[in-house]
Amino acid sequence: MNTKPLNQQDNWSMILRPKKSLFEVNLAELWHYRDLIAMFVKRDFVSKFKQTILGPLWFIVQPLLTTLMFVVVFGNIAGIPTDGIPQVLFYMTGIVGWNYFSTCLNDTSQTFIKNASIFGKVYFPRLAMPISVVISNLVSFAIQFVFLLGFLIYFIAKGSHVAPGIEILLVPFLVLLIAGLGLGFGIIISSLTTKYRDLVHLVSFGVTLWMYATPIIYPLSEIPEKYKAYVMANPMTPIVETFKTALLGVGSVDYFGLLYSFGFMVVLLAIGILIFNKVERTFMDTV
Amino acid sequence: MTDVVIKFEDVSKQYRLGVVGTGTLSHDLNRLFAKMAGKEDPARKVGVSNKLNVRDGDYVWALRDINFSLNDGEVLGVVGKNGAGKSTLLKLLSRVTAPTTGVIKVKGRIASLLEVGTGFHPELTGRENIFLNGAILGMTKREIKSKFDEIVDFSGVSKYVDTPVKRYSSGMYVRLAFAVAAHLEPEILIVDEVLAVGDAEFQKKAIGKMQSVSKSGRTVLFVSHNLTAVEQLCTRGILLQNGTLLMEGPIHDITSAYKKSSVDETNLKRSGTRLVEMQQYKMTDDQGKEIDELFLGDNFYVEASFTAREAADYADFTLDIRNDSNEFIGHVTNADDLFEIKNIAKGENRKIRVEVKDISFAPGTYYVSLWLGNKYGTFDYIENCMRFTIKQGEKFIRRPFPFDKRAKTVLRSIWKAL
């Protein structure tokens, strides 16, 4: 917290006050607790798969089944075009990218409520919790991504019309954008849910609705011109589109859109951290 | 040079009562409108309540204007009844929540044993949990690694260190958790009631660890209901009552003030029909002089008077004796001596005296509850209305060192070589 000494004699290492100024965010302290973040990631991973038969294979089952369902419903029944890309690849690419965002958002949005008992007993920078969630979800994303690459190679070998481009180098940046947006929205929601629980109900179906507003099951090229502005205002749109371009080689990268997403993420994270920081001091009284 | 390491300056903490959920949005809007209209915040009437723990609408002061400081190397006992604000004080200090007003200044790293085992995950092994728990308490991986063997040794679970802790017994679980916390080596250690858990052997270890922590010049804040432990460990104390700091001083002054307040007449828990009502009662020695202290092996007397509001065929009178952990230790009834209290007429006032011989409970603090009733029900039951202390002395047993705290009764023994 405040490390400024009051005067020459008093070298207090910590001063606890009722109201902290809004912009007093201690990232150095968070860095000090990096081992804790690593431990939380490990805990999440180990506890998720102990006493399951398939273990980490579950990471693959979920996108695979969702893809199959999308192929049946949207591809074959509804007949939504996929820019000439094999349906399985088209949907799976979108799902893997979107999944990372939605799990980050869903999991971090419950930071305060889920961890009330541990937060109520001991102090550590509360941000360590949502950050560790984002990192442990990154592990599952990586597994799904490798799985997706396997499919991609299979389809290329079969001679399908897909060609990953040089844009694939952008993927780490895209992942960073997804993580930042998920974290940003998540911590804002988690800060608000300490007082207004209604938001919890909103989040899970809100994220589902959001997916339909993002070009996951349809290509951006199919959007009528008059709606395009709305779809492009969605910060996830350029990310998902670039992700598809990078892996499947359709369309082109909208750098202006990516810049927009990046700016959006920075502002969102800044606001999120400020709110989170303010709430973390007294949320125990209201949870 | 002694150095102030903790300083509380006018610290208060206010809590909101009731369920937070529905209605809070409208409540908040209410406050906002009041603020915008330039009126006083309707939810907070700070000036009004000089009395503590008085509800201001839906708000309550858990702590009010607390001022004290703690020097380097001191062991401070925090004493007070449930709800006096002890836990809130520790919560503020361990940064779980922030004060409403005032400032707390701290020098050095604080580790709290507020609740041991925080963050333990049942699926993880003992080893993994040591690292996780250590990290939660603020240690780096390197620090934990360097102390790992020591922690495992201290906990005594070395055989099971690679077993998931969900297979541990509760005793092993607590031991491991305490071991991690005890090896934090903070400048300031906060301990809250941890001694209530674990077996006696472990408690001894824990107390020893606390003593060594304080001897090595570090500061300890100890909160407990166990006055014997507090007196043993602490040098100074503070007494909290209804959120205010009632007293600050040497630990023996504090505990004796607390003991006095804990048998405060107004707080007595009393139940029964009162058809026959207890009037006066006191504990005396054989001279009839009121006492609250005796030596092992002494006799003591309880005199009580009661008045019948309705006639009763008979009544039984019992004394229940509990120790300061509220364990039921001794029981005495008039039937033990085939003494009868019969044919009580309406309006009659009676007085009885019971002599209890050769008291042989372990030295410590005890509370007496009085019960008056018969097989149809309780006339009058007054809980913990008298308190007394038993001192070891030399009359009953002659050992020249203190009696073992773990034992509850003292047996006399006669030794000879054969």
Image (spheres, coloured by chain):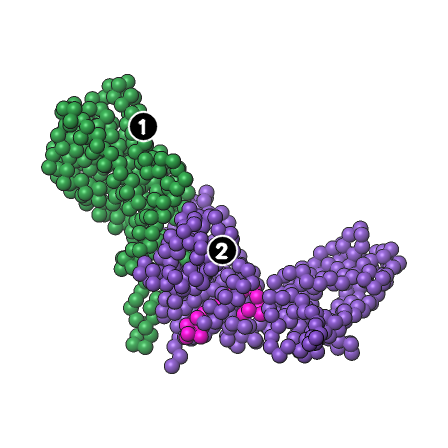
Chain colours: A green, B purple
Q: Name the residue beneath numbered marker 2.
A: B172
Which x, y percent locates residue A26?
Answer: 29, 59
Residue A195 picture location, percent across and down: 41, 47
> Is A184 on the left or on the right of B296, as rendered?
left
Q: What stretch is highlighted in magenta?
A: B213-230
| B245 falls in the magenta region | no
Identify which residue is drawn at 44% across, 53% down: B160
- Chain letter of disc 2 in the image: B
Question: Few, some or many C-alpha atoms within 10 Å of disc 1 (few <14, some 14-19, many ≥20)?
Answer: few
Quadrant placement of the C terminus of chain B: bottom right
Quadrant location of the N terminus of chain B in the rendered image: bottom left
Q: Does the magenta stretch include residue B220?
A: yes
| Camera-nearest residue between A148 and A283 | A148
Q: Nearer the viewer, mark 2 or mark 1?
A: 2
CA–CA distance in space, label 2 to label 1? 43 Å
Amino acid type of the residue tagged 2 in the rendering: Met
Q: Where does residue B415 sit, x and y in percent of width and height?
A: 69, 75
Q: Is mark 2 on a helix, strand or loop?
A: helix
Identify which amino acid the numbered label 1 is placed on.
Leu
Residue at image position (54%, 70%) is B230
Secondary element at image label 1:
helix
Q: In this view, does B235 lie above or below B142?
A: below
Residue at the image point whose x is 51% and y is 73% from the top: B234
Which residue does the numbered mark 1 point to in the structure image?
A65
- On screen, residue A52 versus residue A86, left or right, reads right
Residue A113 makes an appearance in the image: no
Can residue B77 be spotted in the picture?
yes
Farthest front residue in view: B418
Residue plotted at (16% across, 33% down):
A247
